[in-house]
Amino acid sequence: MTDFVSPIQFGELKLKNRVVMAPLTRSRATADRVPTELMAEYYAQRASAGLIIAEATVISEEANGYEKTPGLFTDAQVEGWKKVTDAVHAKDGLIVSQLWHVGRVSHPDLLNGETPVSASAVQQTGHVSLLRPKRSYVLPRALEISEIHAITEQFKQAAMRAKEAGFDGVELHAANGYLIDQFLQTKTNLREDEYGGSVENRARFLLEVVDALVEVWGAGRVGVHLAPRGDEHDMGDHDPRETFGYAMEQLGQRQIAFFFTREYLAEDSMSEYLKERSNGVAYIANMKLDRSSALDLLSSEKADAVSFGKAYIANPDLFERLVIDAEMNELKLENMLGTDVAEGYIDYPFLAK
């Protein structure tokens, strides 16, 4: 029976166990998006995970939707990330960078007055996260084809910087209503050119970016993060099984290292279907898992690894706690985002030795 401790290989990535730390935005980089010493300590504490997917990292300043999220587009950011990857590797850990462009999930106040961009001019409902006083999302501007190509190149440059920074691979953030997802799903993609309409066209940007990342890293060190439910940031698709099934089939043909879905455990989950379409690509399951449901997914081989988010914030030694079914630390909501203090970040206790 597969359990938490079994090692596994995802492409070129050799995981020492089946427990993955999910990418978690904490907004603790500097104003210039440089990772800090505290961030290095935070990730090193969690290096017993089989794989760490680092927090979403913007590929350019124009790609941002939140203050103090880290970047990978300057030399200073690369140097900051080197401290993180060195600290994780010193603890025998494995860490990949999640590359990110938020698209319309931003605001001119975060973009030096510029209008956020998207696949099409479709305004998101609601208010911009973390901006105070609260501001509504604005109508985004549809990207020109030349701009789409330029952003693909930015993803490639960020992937090169991730390699320079010492990461073990990259994951493309194509989920949760951010830019790549805005091209994939029909609610946000109303284009009538080669990037809109048919599922093949809507998936074109995703696949062009993946191909650019593969050029840098090789397919065996590239993963993709998907959210087929479309339950974040006012998303939706008229046929998600077709859209995400096609995308997964194409990713499977490229033999990427892994795919990761943000999916609730439910009868209508698409994860098994996507796994069937994936041509054997490793699958990391995620979303409100507990020890029992995670073990069920592994033992039934419905997932190749299991990922935890908030549980990893409160439990730096989550892997060890899962293995022995130990009590978990309680998550503290204070200092979850945006602060530069140790409390609520690197001060959660480990199990007594």
Image (cartoon, rainbow, N blue to C red):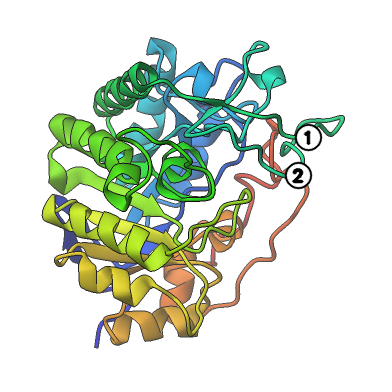
Within 10 Å of disc 1 (Cα), the crowding (few <14, some 14-19, many 20+) is some
Quick one: 33 or 250, which is closer to the camera?
250
The earlier-in-sequence mark between 2 and 1 is 2
Relative horizontal placement of residue 204, taking residue 188 as reference (left or right)? left
Residue 10: give x, y in percent of width and height.
Answer: 19, 58
Query: On the image, numbered disc 2 is attached to which residue?
Result: 126
Relative horizontal placement of residue 44, taking residue 66 as reference (left or right)? left
**Is 312 situated above or below 138?**
below
Query: On the image, numbered disc 1 is attached to which residue?
Result: 136
Relative horizontal placement of residue 130, taking residue 273 as reference (left or right)? right
Residue found at x 63% / y 30%: 106
Quick one: 290 or 328, which is closer to the camera?
290
Residue 64: give x, y in percent of width and height.
Answer: 55, 26
**Is 36 situated above or below 201?**
above
Residue found at x 69% / y 47%: 344
Residue 176: give x, y in percent of width and height.
Answer: 52, 50
Q: State the mark number for residue 293.
A: none
Quadrant occupied by the N terminus? bottom left
**Contact, CB < 8 Å: mark 2 with mark 1?**
yes
In terms of secondary structure, where does tag 2 sit? Answer: loop
In terms of secondary structure, where does tag 1 sit? Answer: loop
Within 10 Å of disc 2 (Cα), the crowding (few <14, some 14-19, many 20+) is few
**What residue type is disc 2 on?**
Gly
Number of marks in the image?
2
